[in-house]
């Protein structure tokens, strides 16, 4: 009887994890944001029901000047946005816990300097807005990136 209960509990836990990531699926795909300085690219794929893997880079005149690996992961009872930038934080990943899910994905790590908060806002199937906010050298800083889906 205990084994049947354990199997049922594991199955239900897997279902809830799958459901938890489903509202985030609009982030999947290839995105770009062009400025007068260059173009920022971000790509997301679904690895499995609890992991989305992503990457981002900023390209100026054909040269990649910034690169990051990204992960959206359902673990420890929450969903986490986990960027890793080789030239920051000693190359270690930084975890941002999801605070809100739906048409906006809001992630926070208040102990981090910049960003402390990352918001992915769904506009429509081809447009998302990413807002990064926090402190840099003790001063408030905010960046807004208006991404367009690449087809």
Image (cartoon, rainbow, N blue to C red):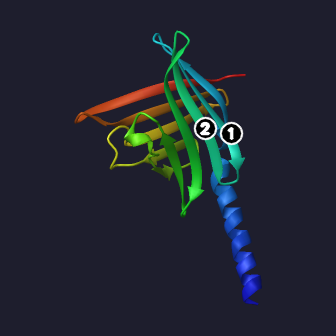
Residue found at x 44% / y 27% = 144
Q: In the image, is residue 74 above or below residue 64?
A: below
Residue found at x 47% / y 10% = 36
Locate residue 53 relative to residue 134 in the image: left or right: right
Within 10 Å of the Cα at label 2, are there few (<14), some (14-19), or many (20+) other Cα atoms? many
Secondary structure, mark 1, is strand
Closest to the observer: 144 or 103? 144
Which image quadrant for residue 87? top left
- Which quarter of the rendering shows the N terminus? bottom right
Within 10 Å of the Cα at label 1, are there few (<14), some (14-19), or many (20+) other Cα atoms? some
Tell which residue pokes out farthest to the left in this image.
138
Which image quadrant for residue 124? top right
Closest to the observer: 31 or 62? 62
Locate residue 136 relative to residue 104 in the image: left or right: left
Residue 12 in percent (x, y) is at 71, 70
Residue 82 in percent (x, y) is at 51, 46
Residue 18 in percent (x, y) is at 69, 57
Q: Give the CA separation, mark 1 to mark 2.
A: 6 Å
Residue found at x 73% / y 83% = 5
Which image quadrant for residue 142? top left
Tell which residue pokes out farthest to the bottom in this image.
1
Could you tell me if the residues under marks 1 and 2 are in contact, i.e. CB atoms within 8 Å?
Answer: yes
- Which quarter of the rendering shows the C terminus? top right
Q: Which mark is residue 143?
A: none
Q: Which residue is mark 1?
A: 45
Residue found at x 58% / y 47% = 72
Sequence order check: which comes first, mark 1 or mark 2? 1
Q: Which mark is residue 54?
A: 2
């Amino acid at each position: 009887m205990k084994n049947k209960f354990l199997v049922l509990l594991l199955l239900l836990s897997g279902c809830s994890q799958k459901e938890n990531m489903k509202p985030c699926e609009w982030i999947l795909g290839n995105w770009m944001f062009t400025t007068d300085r260059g173009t920022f690219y971000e790509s997301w794929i679904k690895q499995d029901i609890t992991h989305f893997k992503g990457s981002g880079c900023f390209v100026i005149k054909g040269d990649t000047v910034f690169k990051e690996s990204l992960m959206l992961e359902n673990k420890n009872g929450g969903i986490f946005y986990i960027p890793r930038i080789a030239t920051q934080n000693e190359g270690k990943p930084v975890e941002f816990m999801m605070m809100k899910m739906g048409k906006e994905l809001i992630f926070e790590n208040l102990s981090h300097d910049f960003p402390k908060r990352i918001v992915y806002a769904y506009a429509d199937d081809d447009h998302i807005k990413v807002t990064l906010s926090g402190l840099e050298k003790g001063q408030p800083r905010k960046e807004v990136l208006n991404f367009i889906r690449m087809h």
